[in-house]
Image (spheres, rainbow, N blue to C red):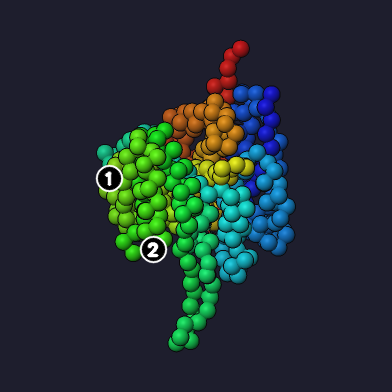
């Protein structure tokens, strides 16, 4: 039977709650496909700061690098918000992404018919939405130099960052996006701010140049401000979106609300080789942490992406996705996706119900 090593990074806030659920679902769904997992749980974020004194201990990165895939909950919280930059939980997450070289972040936002009433948009606007945001994850303003604090000529304090992209960085993310679009509806919208930013002008130039390699993909360009508006005006016009690190961060949170809740959106971050990083797009939700209120489905669906994109285990991925749909069909809802007539449950109970739905798919042999 196949065996994989998985690094678990529960992190902070609701992270441990949702990772615990996703781990159980992963183990059970995997077992039906003859898959075994070896888990190693490592600290990251605030948990690592409290325990080891840094937000990404060397050992955590080393273990992650030699494993087959990494499943992360979330990091961050009030306790560490005032920390200096290098001692912020968020810095640990960025170091992890950079350390693994996972430059391509896939964030699917699909509106499930079961959750149509949880969307804040009108039914006819949200129905049938199926968007894949391909976010560049290891470049742009998050990592650009120069950056820091200083003084201007008037002696005033300033903070500054640099949005920078090289041709090779744009080319590799664009290629991933064209490939993704090719397997979907064949439509790719590149989102930038090329009317103002040089980094975006280069981005648009390279994406346009690469389009000749993908004649079967219909490429369009959109400015990010318009894209933010179009996403709520008529989200169905989008199939695949490719964009830079910071625009992708913002637009994927926006896209998550089309689907009903940020608690539903998974993500996969991959490189050309080496383990992928799989995490929900939401944060540590300190406002509901420790209360068993978190929606674990984004992390459960991230585990499905781990199986599909990280391990090539398509069948097990499908078992999980089907179980999530079935659990919703059976009426179970956490608070963030609750609507009248449904059964309100907490994080753990939702996990138990997903496990039941996985169980119902056990092959009778
Ligand atoms: P957040 O995503 O943690 O929370 C935003 C809102 O969504 C909150 O009201 C929260 O309760 C709700 N929410 C989020 N996930 C949910 C879930 N699974 N189920 C139900 N409700 C959910 O964003 P924030 O409040 O801006 O940030 C909180 C902390 O998380 C910060 O420290 C931030 O830096 C960090 N953060 C981490 C990640 C990550 O680890 N990848 C992502 C985003 C934010
Ligand atoms: C995300 C988060 C992170 C990001 C933060 C916590 C560094 O918002 O994963 O979407 O901006 O990428
Ligand atoms: Mn974000």
Residue 58 showing in the rendered view: yes
- Which residue is drawn at the image coordinates 54% and 45% (left, top)? 269
Above or below for 164 versus 119: below
Q: Label 1, on which residue?
A: 234
Relative to 5, residue 169 above or below = below
Query: Residue shown at 65%/54% (left/top)?
Result: 44
Q: Is residue 313 left or right of residue 122?
A: right
Q: Is residue 328 above or below residue 52?
A: above
CA separation, marks 2 and 1? 29 Å
- Callout 2 secondary element: helix
Q: Is residue 230 left or right of residue 147?
A: left
Pinpoint residue 184: horizontal percent, then vertical percent. Answer: 39, 34
Q: Quadrant of residue 337?
A: top left
Image quarter for residue 185?
A: top left
- Using the image, determine if residue 177 lies above or below residue 166: above
**Marking on residue 198:** 2
């Amino acid at each position: 039977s196949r065996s994989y090593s998985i690094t678990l990074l529960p992190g902070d806030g609701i992270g441990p709650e949702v990772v615990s659920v996703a781990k159980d679902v992963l183990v059970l769904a995997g077992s039906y496909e003859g898959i075994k997992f070896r888990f190693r749980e490592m600290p990251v974020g605030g948990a690592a700061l409290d325990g080891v004194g840094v937000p990404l201990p060397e050992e955590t990165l080393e273990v992650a690098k030699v494993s087959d895939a990494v499943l992360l909950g979330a990091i961050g919280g009030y306790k560490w918000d005032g920390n200096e930059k290098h001692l912020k939980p968020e810095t640990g997450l960025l170091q992890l992404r950079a350390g693994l070289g996972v430059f391509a972040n896939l964030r699917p936002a699909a509106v499930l018919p079961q959750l149509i009433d949880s969307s804040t948009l009108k039914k006819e606007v949200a129905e049938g939405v199926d968007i894949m945001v391909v976010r560049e994850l290891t470049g742009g303003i998050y990592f650009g130099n120069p950056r820091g604090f200083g003084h201007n000529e008037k002696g005033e304090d300033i903070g500054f960052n640099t949005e920078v992209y090289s041709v090779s960085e744009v080319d590799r993310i664009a290629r991933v996006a064209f490939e993704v679009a090719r397997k979907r509806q064949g439509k790719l919208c590149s989102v930038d701010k090329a009317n103002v930013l040089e980094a975006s002008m280069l981005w648009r130039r390279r994406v346009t140049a690469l389009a000749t390699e993908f004649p079967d993909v219909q490429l369009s360009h959109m400015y990010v401000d318009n894209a933010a508006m179009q996403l709520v005006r008529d989200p169905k016009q989008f199939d695949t979106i490719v964009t830079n690190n910071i625009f992708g961060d913002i637009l994927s949170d926006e896209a998550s609300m089309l689907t009903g809740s940020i608690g539903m959106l998974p993500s996969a971050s991959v490189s050309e080789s080496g383990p992928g990083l799989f995490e929900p797009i939401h944060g540590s939700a300190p406002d509901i942490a420790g209360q068993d209120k978190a929606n674990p489905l984004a992390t459960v669906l991230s585990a499905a992406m781990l199986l599909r994109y990280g391990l090539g285990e398509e069948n097990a991925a499908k078992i999980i996705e089907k179980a999530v749909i079935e659990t919703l069909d059976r009426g179970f809802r956490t608070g963030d996706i609750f609507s009248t007539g449904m059964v309100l449950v907490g994080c753990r109970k939702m996990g138990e119900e997903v496990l039941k739905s996985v169980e119902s798919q056990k092959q009778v042999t």
